[in-house]
Image (cartoon, helix red, strand yellow):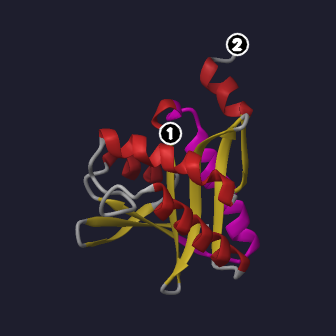
Amino acid sequence: MHDGSERNANRIAIRDMQIDDANAIFCIIRDIYKEDKTPFFFDSMPDENEIEGLLATKLELSREGKCIDLVACDGQRVVGEAELVLKEEKWYIGMFVDKAVRRLGIGTSLLNELAKRAAKLGIANVYAEVIKSNEIAISFFEHNNFEECAVQGGKSVLLKKL
């Protein structure tokens, strides 16, 4: 017998992010910031135009081979985003999942798809930069075989070999 979380995870589709996802992504970020004021991607809560501009930039970076940006969808509803971005000659991962559907395997599904695509591109190492106080994110990455390799400016930098 399968529990509800397994059925829910099986309904999730992973696809490339599109500019039309901006509003859904903004809503998830807004909801995360309502509950947790700790900045995770931004110093303060971005507005919808800033999110759309950021996504447009990531789409351009994707066309240049410098970014992979994915969303997880439950039906038509975007419930998470994960990106792999080339910064200063290193590939960094960033991701978030709607709080209402966490712990259902969505983050792991996003991470696994990013890893597959990165391996196809010959990317050997992926870094995750996480705020040291974000124990849930650190635990997630450690559970997925990331290892702490450095601490910089209050952030824990984790490394995963692909």
Q: Are marks 1 and 2 in contact (CB under 8 Å)?
A: no
Residue 135: image location, x then y, percent = 31, 47
Front label number (1 vs 2): 1
Upstream in the sequence, badge 1 or badge 2? 2
- The answer to whether residue 1 is magenta is no
Circle 2 residue: 1
Q: Specify the quadrant of the image occupied by residue 46.
A: bottom left
Specify the farthest residue to the right: 120
Specify the farthest residue to the top: 1
Give the residue type at disc 2.
Met
Q: Specify the principal SS of the magenta part.
A: helix
Image: magenta residue range:
101-126
Q: Specify the quadrant of the image occupied by residue 30.
A: top left
Secondary structure state at the residue bearing disc 1: loop
Residue 129: image location, x then y, percent = 40, 66
Which residue is at a point 49% across and 44% down the rendered structure image? 27
Q: Is residue 75 left or right of residue 133?
A: right
Q: Is residue 99 left or right of residue 161?
A: left
Q: Residues within 10 Å of mark 2 (few under 14, many from 20)?
A: few
Residue 64: image location, x then y, percent = 70, 82
Image quadrant containing the C terminus: bottom right
Which residue is at a point 30% across and 59% down the rendered structure image? 44
Residue 13: image location, x then y, percent = 73, 42
Circle 1 residue: 98
Which residue is at a point 72% across and 65% down the rendered structure image? 117
Specify the farthest residue to the bottom: 89
Give the residue type at disc 1.
Asp
Q: Is residue 37 above or below residue 41?
A: above
Who is closer to the viewer here, 18 or 137?
18
